[in-house]
């Protein structure tokens, strides 16, 4: 054991190690190689002994084939031994004939399996041979014990080796964690620079948009559009006023038509019901119908309603209803005229708006307005990204010293003494 430890940690003056950050991986590789070389040297003798003991044991077991039983052995025992011996020999040869690799850890695993198999054979079929072949079985157990003692020597050596490699792996993990943290910190500065650059570019473009918008707003050609704007606004006002009047008339007439439809339904006047429903559908539609369509529907529906009014089936409740149905021809003409005028105004409004929108200066200003909103949204996103990045980096920066301390601790566990650790290229920040 002393030889193994000396081979790993060296003499006392070499226990104190000075390392830079970049030297750690190679140093750990050297430590691992030294540990592997040391354990290979330490187990060389027990491996040699195990191979010899295994071969001797296999020869000893196979000699049982020709061994003579004690003449005074009970016939029943002789019979049992005769039946058990082939099974015992087969089990032992199966275990002892297994290949033993050269690599120490693989050799150890195979040797353990070999001994387990041999012990199982002795405790199994072998127990029936103890009386028939007492000396041979005693020698067999002694041979197995000899292999077991050498395995125990290997167990201690490999245990120390595994403990050492576990410390090395722990140091590697600590180094990787510190390396990743340093790398991520370094990358974060580059990423922040790119974000700052994009924010600056967006700011420059927004300033350019502001300047161009101001210049376009002072463009003399815009003054000629004032009259067109006023005309467009007046057309819209007329259209909306006409629409309100149309809606008032059709809503009032639809109320009376609905009464008439209910009466026609009650009287089973299917033709009249169909006429009234068609008229109500046209008048209540959100889209203003063509003048001809409205006139045709009212010319068919108004006589039906008028007859019900004359027969006393419908009572007109207010002056608006009486005004409409006191002269249905006039009402039909008025609604048709409103439809015609509405469509004319709608066309004029659309043409005026298209004229305004198609003006090159206004079109450009609209485009700049859209771009301005998009860039402001993008800048806000970039600023949030920058804020989150800085917060993340601040947290990560606090972990770097802790990770460095952890690495030094793991290196110290390997060396057993103080480790002087140097970080030659500190991360920005």
Image (cartoon, grey):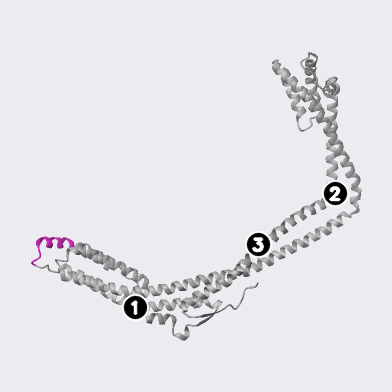
Q: Is 73 included in the stretch rendered in magenta?
A: yes
Name the residue: 47% across, 82% down: 15
Q: Nearer the viewer, residue 333 or 390?
A: 390
**Between tags 3 and 2, which lies in front?**
3
Query: Which of the 4 quarters of the picture holds residue 128?
Result: bottom left
Q: Identify residue for label 2.
A: 359
Give the side of residue 344 with respect to residue 71, left or right. Answer: right
Q: Position of residue 374 (x, y in %)?
A: 74, 54
- Of the 4 image quadrants, the one containing the C terminus is bottom right
Q: Nearer the viewer, residue 86 or 70?
A: 70
Q: Identify residue for label 3.
A: 388
Q: Identify residue for label 1.
A: 44
Q: Tell me which numbered mark, 2 or 1, is placed earlier along the sequence.
A: 1
Q: For label 2, count other residues whose C-alpha is less than 10 Å away and answer few (under 14), some (14-19) or many (20+).
A: some
Q: Which residues are magenta?
A: 71-84
Check disc 1 and report its element: helix, strand or loop.
helix
**Between tags 3 and 1, which lies in front?**
3
- Of the 4 image quadrants, the one containing the N terminus is bottom left
Whether residue 129 is visible: yes
């Amino acid at each position: 054991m002393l030889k193994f430890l000396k081979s790993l940690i060296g003499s006392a003056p070499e226990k104190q190690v000075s390392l830079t950050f970049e030297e750690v991986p190679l140093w750990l590789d050297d430590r691992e190689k030294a540990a592997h070389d040391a354990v290979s040297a330490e187990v060389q003798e027990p491996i040699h002994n195990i191979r010899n003991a295994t071969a001797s044991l296999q020869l000893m077991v196979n000699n049982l084939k020709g061994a003579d039983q004690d003449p005074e052995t009970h016939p029943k025992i002789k019979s049992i031994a005769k039946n058990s011996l082939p099974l015992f020999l087969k089990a032992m040869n199966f275990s002892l004939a297994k290949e033993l690799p050269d690599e120490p850890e693989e050799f150890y695993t195979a040797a353990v399996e070999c001994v387990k198999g041999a012990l199982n054979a002795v405790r199994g079929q072998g127990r029936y041979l103890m009386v028939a072949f007492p000396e041979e079985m005693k020698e067999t157990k002694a041979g197995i014990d000899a292999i077991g003692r050498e395995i125990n020597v290997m167990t201690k050596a490999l245990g120390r080796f595994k403990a050492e490699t576990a410390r090395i792996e722990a140091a590697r993990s600590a180094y990787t964690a510190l390396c990743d943290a340093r790398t991520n910190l370094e990358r974060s500065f580059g990423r922040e620079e790119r974000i700052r650059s994009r924010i600056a570019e967006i700011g420059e473009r927004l300033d350019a948009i502001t300047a161009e918008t101001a210049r376009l707003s002072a463009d003399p050609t815009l003054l000629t559009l004032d009259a067109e704007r006023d005309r467009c606004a007046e057309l819209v006002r007329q259209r909306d006023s006409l629409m309100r009047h149309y809606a008032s008339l059709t809503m009032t007439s639809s109320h009376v038509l609905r009464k008439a439809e209910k009466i026609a339904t009650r009287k089973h006047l299917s033709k009249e019901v169909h006429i009234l429903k068609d008229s109500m559908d046209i008048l209540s539609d959100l889209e203003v119908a063509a003048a001809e369509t409205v006139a045709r529907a009212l010319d068919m529906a108004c006589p039906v309603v008028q007859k019900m009014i004359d027969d006393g089936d419908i009572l007109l409740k207010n002056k608006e209803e009486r005004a409409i149905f006191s002269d249905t021809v006039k009402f039909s003409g008025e609604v048709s005229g409103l439809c015609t005028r509405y469509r004319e105004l709608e066309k004029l409004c659309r043409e005026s708006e298209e004229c305004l929108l198609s003006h090159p200066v206004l079109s450009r200003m609209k485009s700049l307005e859209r771009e301005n909103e998009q860039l402001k949204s993008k800048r806000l996103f970039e600023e949030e990204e920058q804020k989150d990045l800085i917060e993340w980096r601040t947290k990560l920066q606090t972990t770097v010293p802790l990770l460095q301390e952890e690495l030094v601790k793991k290196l110290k566990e390997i060396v057993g003494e103080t480790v002087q650790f140097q970080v030659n290229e500190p991360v920005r920040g």
